[in-house]
């Protein structure tokens, strides 16, 4: 009986080691935070992100284009900026009080979407945003996204907004709709792996629950967050357009 128990324990340990290996991650240390990615993911070079930003500015002339500070994608992809990918935005525009974070589920994101996506109709359609959800324990605001992207098809995404003492960090994760459920656990794992440095880590304050003492208009922050999430989903389209232009 003891011998059987030993074999079971050995089997469990072996399986645990296999699982750990399968979900092995690599840490990416950036100014102010650390992010972990599963094996097989690599960082997108800064020059690629800059090139895509310039192309977006050129194509979407009437839209304010956000800057994405970091990007990651599968190493096996044939080209840069192919789905699935992850983009990171760092905003130091000011600390958001916690009572405003808690008010997220009350916001009508699709009403706000009308103003943010009006100038992008030639690139996307049937765009919808899910209801914001605030995880009080992890201090993450979740936003989901779905859209029909011209030349690509249906795209889905999930973004995690992580408050800091200076503003927030937003992690946008995207894939084609057909693969989204496959990558969703990985996307959530990537967002929740973000560790803000001790000096920037969000800390509750005694005045956080008082709207009177809040110095930030959350609707403006939400509008920026939505804009960043929408445009992040289009990056692959503009990357493909730029490649065709170079090849043509």
Image (spheres, grey):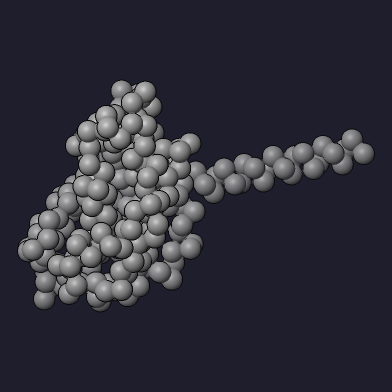
Residue 11 screen position, x and y as percent? 74, 44
**Quadrant placement of the C terminus:** bottom left
Residue 183, image quadrant? bottom left
* Residue at point 69%, 39% (across, down): 13
In the displayed structure image, the side of residue 84 where residue 18 appears, left or right: right
Total marks in image = 0
From what the image shows, is residue 53 above or below residue 92?
below
* Residue at point 62%, 41% (across, down): 17
Outermost residue, right side: 1
* Residue at point 10%, 66% (across, down): 59
Q: Which one is nearer the viewer's eye here, 86 or 207? A: 207
In the displayed structure image, the side of residue 10 where residue 184 appears, left or right: left
* Residue at point 48%, 63% (across, down): 181
**Quadrant placement of the N terminus:** top right
Residue 221 screen position, x and y as percent? 24, 45
Residue 214 screen position, x and y as percent? 26, 33
Q: Is residue 40 visible?
A: no
In the displayed structure image, the side of residue 76 where residue 115 appears, left or right: left
In the displayed structure image, the side of residue 87 where residue 38 appears, left or right: right
Q: Is residue 134 visible?
A: yes
Q: Which one is nearer the viewer's eye here, 239 or 13? A: 239
């Amino acid at each position: 009986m003891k011998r059987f128990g030993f074999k079971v324990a050995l089997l469990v340990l072996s399986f645990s080691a296999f699982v750990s290996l399968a979900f092995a991650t690599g840490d990416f240390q950036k100014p102010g935070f650390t992010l972990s990615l599963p094996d097989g993911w690599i960082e997108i070079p800064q020059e690629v992100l800059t090139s895509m930003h310039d192309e977006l500015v050129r194509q979407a002339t009437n839209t304010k284009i956000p800057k994405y500070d970091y990007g990651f994608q599968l190493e096996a992809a044939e080209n840069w900026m192919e789905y699935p990918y992850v983009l990171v935005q760092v905003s130091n525009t000011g600390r958001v009080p916690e009572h405003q974070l808690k008010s997220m589920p009350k916001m009508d994101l699709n009403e706000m979407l009308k103003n943010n996506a009006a100038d992008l109709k030639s690139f996307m359609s049937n765009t919808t945003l899910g209801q914001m959800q605030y995880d009080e324990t992890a201090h993450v605001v979740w936003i989901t996204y779905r859209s029909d992207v011209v030349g690509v098809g249906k795209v889905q995404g999930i973004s995690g907004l992580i408050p800091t003492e200076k503003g927030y960090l937003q992690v946008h994760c995207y894939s084609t709709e057909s693969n989204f459920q496959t990558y969703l656990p990985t996307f959530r794992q990537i967002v929740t792996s973000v560790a803000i440095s001790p000096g920037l880590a969000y800390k509750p304050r005694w005045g956080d629950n008082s709207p009177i003492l809040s110095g930030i208009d959350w609707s403006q922050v939400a509008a920026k967050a939505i804009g960043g999430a929408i445009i992040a989903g289009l990056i692959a389209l503009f990357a493909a357009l730029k490649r065709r232009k170079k090849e043509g």
